[in-house]
Image: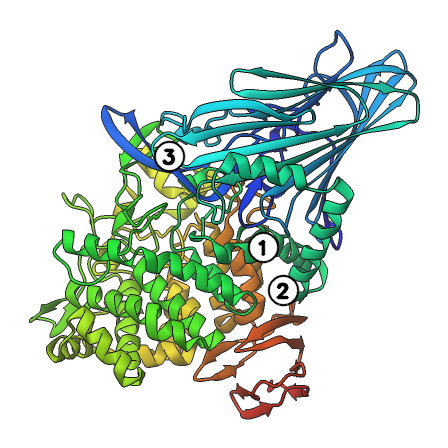
Amino acid sequence: MTGWSWEYEGYTPADERLRESLCTLGNGYFASRGALPECAADEVHYPGTYVAGCYNRLISEVAGRQVENEDMVNVPNWLPLRYRLPGGSWLTPDTATVLDHRQMLHLSAGLLERRTRYDLGEGRELTVRQQRFVHMADRHLAALRTDFTAEGFSGPLEVEAALDGGVTNAGVPRYRDLDGRHLTHVHTGTAAPDTVWLRCRTRTSDVRIGMAARLTVDAPLAVRHEGRRAVQQAVLDLAPGRTVTVDKTVALHTSHDPAISDPLYAAVDRVGQAPGFDDLLERHLTAWDQLWRRADLDVPGEAGRILRLHLFHVLQTLSPHTADLDVGVPARGLHGEAYRGHVFWDELFVLPYLDLHFPEVSRALLRYRHRRLEQACTAARSVGRKGAMYPWQSGSDGREETQQLHLNPRSGRWMPDHSHLQHHVGSAIAYNVWQYCEASGDTEFLHTKGAEMLLQIARFWADSAVYDDSLGRHRIKGVVGPDEYHEAYPDAQQPGLDDNAYTNVTAAWVLARALELLRTLPEPRCRELVERTGLDGGELELWEDVSRTLHVPFHDDVISQFEGYGELAELDWEAYRARYGDIRRLDRILEAEDDSVNRYQASKQADVLMLGYLFSPAELRSLFGRLGYLLDEDTWRRTVDYYLRRTSHGSTLSGLVHGWVLARDRRAEAWKFCQEALQGDIADVQGGTTGEGIHLGAMAGTLDLVQRGLTGLETRGGALWLDPVPLPELSSYGFALRYQGHWGVRLRLERERLEIAVPSSDASPIDIRLPDRRVSLQPGETVRLLLPD
């Protein structure tokens, strides 16, 4: 790592998948993994290109059952460019002697560079230098420059560039029993002497894809079309010490794009009008400069360098281009095929960061959810519920995309998957609606689309709650919480758990916010909503009652993860660590032993403690108080300790949440978990998962940790609330944010001092609230505040 680059020295086949994920380049519209252009997909390499929102559905035969899955499609590969001496084998690091190999990801430029020096024998060497980018200004373009330099010899070098439509989705070994052949009707052709094209469509979703490539080289070009590939060939004349350059410019369109008549015509036209590599790069660099200014982050040391890499990948997946698309937050970015490119609840960890930098992107991501509101209401009706039941996994439309089976690689068995019962995804959507509107001041969205989602999610929770006479409280039964290990009670015939604390408390929060919104809406708009949704006074009374009487189970003076959690068996953690070492995926270990994690007090990741991630201590106490429970500091501290001892951290989100919570509760231990969150992908702490795609929620969450977690920053009630808890290891840093029309508000934390600067504008003053004071900052003013010990 250096300040603005990520570098790999040497060639290590076992590390290639990880490097390819972390060296992915994208622009929010499409992204390509950082695979070497001369290498085809095999056990070592996996070139993949993914277009945001491009899905296809296939049916596979698995374990004697027909299973339907929708995948984000690996579209035709634009990268292929290989080379060889006449009569020789194609040169790759796997087939030739490599003297030096270096890969550099230039974060500031959005540019991937590689340098490889091959030993060709008899004193001959060939140096290959490549630069590539996926254009951040023109979302449909990408370019690859290859420089060849001979040493110790002269003569011809054969070069072959291609567009390859013969790709499949085969990047995740666990899915290889599933059909991954998503492309059909692949055709290729020639548009100009230097330009070839490829068109195809997805098999069932019928998304049409057009791709065109222009090859610029000082040598005659030959073209051939073979099967699903369009191939361009040239023979370069090499001389010692002289560099010969080949530029490949590519355009990509799909039938989802607006303002085009045909994807192929649009791609051919765009690549034909595209300027040369240098001019394209200049515009690309300008676009990245603007992004970095808007997301300015100044954190010293190794943590700062990792955070910059995380920010880079967030911006490549969810850039300002995303604001024009109908897409959600893919949990693994546009970086690979894990989770099939689906949208989960990870936006809960992503949008709070974007809200304060790119609110237009947050709004677009919430509109993705709003467009699927009708489908969520249909799903609720199908199970006899009112309101909106959003799916745990989403794709192209609003139906549930959670797979019916999942493979345990340890046992080789396909097991039922009940994670579709994680209905708390609805609360995550409602939370993001509220947070976005508080940060942006977008009352138009809150009063229209936001209100419609919030009210229907609240309606689902109120209708899902059943009254228990023996408790005198409402209960929500048959769900799965964020933990994910526990899907059923031991030996139960049906999946689902009762009174998951996180689910019930967040449901109560949604109901309270919905009631608050109805009280503050303009009367004409409120009347419209009531008329359209059929809300009546009786239903609103039920919301009020449920929001105050939802059951939260306790045992041993701590909050129970769900009713009965304290009655489960204790696990011999030390014995399992001694036997297996890494027990992050304890569920797989136990299943392979013909046991079940459902029997034990063991959690994959934060569940109850997620409440401390979403809500400040004061708001959490208030929520429990509304429900009729006293949540004092001792009870919360005991709860934190209890679950820390019983969590295996089988998710990259786990370290993030625990670091966030411990920063306020046990500061001395927080940094260990913060480091795990920072290292999650670069060190591949989950054991091989990063090569299948980065963990976008964890990456964005670490950014939000320094933005909101350690500063105690909240946007509520028209004010910026701050309650800093600087860690010794991360006590001095700064960042800029965008808040309710103020661009570039700068905050800097310097141990015991907080500096806030508001740029000049004609906007209203910003109301700043700290635990012991209140400050009003006019545009153009800077304030320096001493923090209490």
- Label placed on residue 206: 3
Q: Are discs 3 and 1 less than 8 Å apart at CB?
A: no
Q: Is residue 278 left or right of residue 774?
A: right
- The correct choice, above or below, for 274 with respect to 194 in the image is below
Q: Compared to 48, does 94 lie above or below?
A: above
Circles 2 and 1: CB atoms closer than 8 Å: yes
Q: What type is the residue that disc 2 sits on?
A: Ala
SS assignment at label 1? helix
How far apart are the alpha carbons under marks 3 and 1? 29 Å
Camera-side residue of 264 and 297: 264
Which residue is farthest top?
87
Looking at marks 2 and 1 on the same chain, the residue that comes earlier in the sequence is marked by 2
**Side of 786 where 61 appears, left or right:** left
Q: Residue 492, position in %: x, y?
A: 15, 45
Q: Quadrant of residue 625?
A: bottom left
Q: Observer-nearest residue: 715 or 534?
A: 534
Q: Which residue is mark 2?
A: 295
